[in-house]
Image: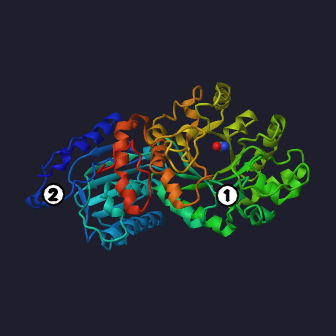
Amino acid sequence: MRQHHRSPRLFGSLLLVAAAGFSSVAAVPGGDSTGQEAAEAATAATPTPLGQVVPAPASAVPGGSPFEINSKTRIRVDGSRDAQKTGSYLAGVLRPSTGYPLKVTDDGGSDGIRLRLNSKDASLGNEGYRLESKRGSLTITARKSAGLFYGVQTLRQQLPAAAEQKTVQKGPWQVAGGTIKDAPRYGYRSAMLDVSRHFFSVDKVKRYIDQMSLYKVNKLHMHLSDDQGWRIAIDSWPKLATYGGSTQVGGGKGGYYTKAQYKDIVQYAASRQLEVIPEIDMPGHTNAALASYAELNCNGVAPPLYTGTEVGFSSLCVKKDVTYDFVDDVIREIAAMTPGKYIHIGGDEAHSTSHEDYVAFMDKVQPLVAKYGKTAIGWHQLTGATPAKGAIAQYWGYDATSAAEREQVANAAKNGTKLVLSPADRSYLDMKYDKDTPLGLAWAGYVSTQRSYDWDPGTYLKGAPADSIEGVEAPLWSETLSTSAHIEYMAFPRLPGIAELGWSPASTHDWNTYKVRLAEQGPRWDAMGIGYYKAPDVPWPGK
Ligand code: ACM
């Protein structure tokens, strides 16, 4: 008789289901097992309880026999190209570790891993999926390719961590029986990478994309320009990249993405269901542009390149017409490489721009974003100007942010401006965990794993209507970070928590159950070679 249905960890997932407001059907242990299965079960590792994944699914109803991948398992896709691609992606993950052929086929059949895009269940929306696991088959159905992809991410986490290894491992490869039905709380679940303070190569960006996609993050916000570097080729203003991108914090050689490289990132992100949101930060944080073109400066003199970490000293010249020719060209060229809906225009820390100039600048620049068919996002200082209809403000305040500033943002939200929340003392992945963290900054305080997770986007900003919240973002600023190892040390284990706040129903929110699910990611990150911080507030296995 299988014992695993009675494991204490399963109890956790049943609680999760109950908390999510779905009724759960108790498993009948051993009710359907054969003698041979009983013998197998005696030696088999207990499968991860259904639903014990990050982000927590909306509903998980465990029950019945597990599904097991074996040497004959096929990945059966329906005829669609999206299912085919997702099937190949899954095979690419599981072939090295299982050593099985895992043939991807559209020849029908009711056994094996089945990926289907034929769901008629409207409640799944564009990103939801249903995963049904039982003896002989595991079926993921969705309405759209994103849902199928997210179902596959859930499947990965239901398998043993060894499934993530790159060399053949010992099975068995079981997925607990039952049904998961899942769809996100928010449609905007973002991670930001600052490639300006330190430049990150295309391969490093792709590596981070792969990591964020494990947790169903669906936006990659790229901070492409700042005082220290301009990182994207603009044909009409070529020196932005060739000169403005030629250094970085500390004086290294910096770098920039050619248009072909940038499009490659955009395409790769799309293959992981992520929309790239390019940011050109204006009118402050513009020294790299000002250094590249003297005419953009009010005094007509180009400042030197900058490799320090101060903020607030640069501004585009708001009164010059050439400034808007420049912005128009940049937005036009970037919009042409952006299949997504948004362009982020920055707008933070414009301490060298007068309030009057700031308002005038935003009044001129937001229509340029609309002119090229995109929706503007700005840091929440945009609410001190006049946000365009449909614009999004990204709140990055923290405990020390004044009540007046918070109120300004909340009032904008009441008036129809949508918000993305990235509170600096919660979601900024570059904040140190504690005083001993060797990397990162601490201006918003130390941000432990628990602190990062333990807030509710729906109620966080007093006075902002719950339906004004589009979602959340976890920014990673790179003043102190220059390698993938640095990214991973700061993002893991905190990024999955922000991703969960964006995905999971508020009713699942509970640090004590979350930290157990999070701890189980550790062996996966070990298998994938993600160098995470072993945060002391997380009960890592074997600790
Ligand atoms: C910011 O952290 N200056 C948006």
Q: Tell whether 521 sits left or right of 426.
A: left
Between 441 and 255, the one nearer to me in the picture? 441
* SS at mark 2 in the image: helix
Q: Tell whether 512 sits left or right of 320.
A: left
Q: Nearer the viewer, mark 2 or mark 1?
A: 1
Question: Looking at this rendering, what residue extends furthest in the front direction?
Answer: 436
Q: Please tell me the numbered disc located at residue 532.
A: none
Amino acid carrying label 1: it is: Gly
The percent coordinates of residue 343 (x first, y second) are 68, 51
Amino acid carrying label 2: it is: Ala
Considering only vertical position in the picture, is 111 above or below 53? below
Considering only vertical position in the picture, is 420 above or below 255? above
The percent coordinates of residue 212 (x first, y second) are 49, 54
Q: Would you say residue 423 is visible in this rendering?
A: no
Q: How many marks?
A: 2
Residue at screen point 45% across, 36% down: 454
Q: Tell whether 356 sits left or right of 64.
A: right
* SS at mark 1 in the image: helix
Q: Would you say residue 206 is visible in this rendering?
A: yes
Q: Please tell me the numbered disc located at residue 41.
A: 2
Q: Estimate how packed mark 1 is, as few (under 14), some (14 to 19) or many (20 or more) residues with alpha carbons within 10 Å.
A: some
Q: Please tell me the numbered disc located at residue 250.
A: 1
Considering only vertical position in the picture, is 74 above or below 152? below
The percent coordinates of residue 435 (x first, y second) are 51, 42
The CA span between labels 2 and 1 is: 57 Å
CB at disc 2 and ligand 1 closer than 8 Å: no
CB at disc 1 and ligand 1 closer than 8 Å: no
Corner quadrant of residue 75: bottom left
Q: Earlier in the sequence, mark 2 or mark 1?
A: 2
The percent coordinates of residue 144 (x first, y second) are 47, 55
Quadrant for ligand 1 reads: top right
Between 393 and 525, the one nearer to me in the picture? 525
